[in-house]
Image (cartoon, grey):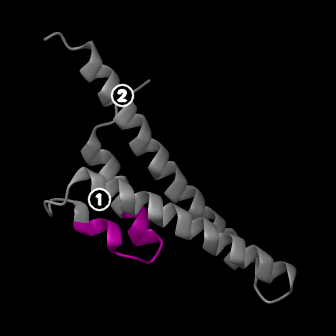
Amino acid sequence: MAMIDPMSVAKAYASAQESAGGAGGAKFIGSGNDFGDLVKNAISDAVHSSQHAEKQMAAQVQGKAQLVDVATSLASAQSSLETVMAVRDQVISAYQEFMRMTI
């Protein structure tokens, strides 16, 4: 498995936020906010994207939304979830590496 550095994850998150129409992720790169805030916001964005996708699906079933809007919402939710999973994988990898260190 290829090693992913944290800066690449942050840039991917910022890129995903920008493509989803928000600029919320871009403020984390080089702004001095801590990693905990980045994770909290990434998880929050993933939850909001999922809720929006669910609302779009319900509206489409009722005939109030276009299928393209549902597909866009689902793609945004998937992108957010993949970002959160990438961050989680990096945290687990860093923890495992830390645990292998000798004192």
In the drawing, what numbered circle is on residue 37? 1
> In the image, is residue 21 part of the stretch drawn in magenta?
yes
Residues rendered magenta in the picture? 15-27
Figure quadrant of residue 27: bottom left
Measured as percent of width and height from the top left, residue 91 is found at: 35, 36
Q: CA distance from mark 2 to mark 1?
A: 19 Å
> In the image, is residue 62 part of the stretch drawn in magenta?
no
User: In the picture provided, is 21 more to the left or to the right than 71?
Assistant: left
Circle 2 or circle 1, nearest the eye: 1
Figure quadrant of residue 16: bottom left
Q: Residue furthest bottom?
A: 64
Vertical order, 17 against 86 (above or below): below
Measured as percent of width and height from the top left, residue 14 is found at: 34, 62
Local secondary structure at mark 2 = helix
Is mark 2 in CB contact (under 8 Å) with mark 1? no
Measured as percent of width and height from the top left, residue 75 is found at: 61, 63
| Amino acid type indicated by mark 2 | Ser
Point out the image quarter for the C terminus: top left
Read off the residue under disc 2.
93
- From the viewer's side, name the closer residue of 25 and 35: 35
Measured as percent of width and height from the top left, residue 80 is found at: 50, 58
Q: Which residue is found at the position 41% from the left and 67% from the top?
A: 17
| Amino acid type indicated by mark 1 | Asp
Vertical order, 10 against 51 (above or below): above
Q: Residue furthest right?
A: 62
